[in-house]
Amino acid sequence: MRNTAFGFGTPLLCFLLLALGIALFSDTARGEERIPITFPPLTTHTMPPVFFTHDRHVEYMERSNAECTLCHRETDEGMSETFLDVKAQPEHRQIPYLHATCTACHRKAGAGPRLVDCRVCHSKAVAAQSGKSNEGE
């Protein structure tokens, strides 16, 4: 009698189900909007652009009973699209300002990336998915 309950087909089926699960629960499949940070404008790119997960941050802010004005300024036209006071910084301080401000908030919340691994925020894979991989341009 031949016992093939755990032959080649079972591991292959498990792998395919795992891959499907990962795809279904990825940020894109959940409708996670990734917004490229475009200010300050950069003339040279040494890293892939950062894509901000706005929906995830809004959900966190709602759970924390925090206001959008924690990260944005209200203007006559509505809520500013650029991050809190980045334009008020001298040009050479804008990127360090973003790094410090984002990291400080992540540290305070006990969640999100820190300034430990640049590639957590500057992801080649995310930039490639968005068609905006401009590292080294």
Image (spheres, rainbow, N blue to C red):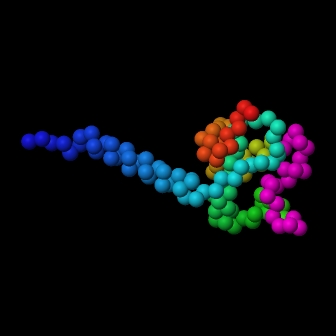
Q: Position of residue 30 (x, y in %)?
A: 55, 58
- Residue 9 is left or right of residue 116, and the answer is left
Residue at (90, 50) in percent of width and height: 88
Residue 121 visible in this rendered orientation of the protein? no
| Residue sitting at the far front | 131
Q: Which residues are magenta?
A: 75-94
In reply to whether residue 82 is colored magenta, the answer given is: yes
Horizontally, residue 42 falls left or right of residue 61, namely right
Where does residue 85 sit, x and y in percent of width and height? 85, 53
Q: Does residue 63 belong to the magenta stretch? A: no
* Label tally: 0
Question: Can you say which quadrant of the picture contains the N terminus?
Answer: top left
**The C terminus: image quadrant:** top right
Place of residue 104 in the rendered image (x, y in percent of width and height, measured from the top left): 74, 48
Residue at screen point 83% across, 67% down: 78
- Pick out the residue farthest to the left: 1
Work out whether residue 58 can be spotted: yes
Residue 44 in the image: above or below residue 19: above
**Front-lying residue, 118 or 22:** 22
Residue 128 picture quarter: top right
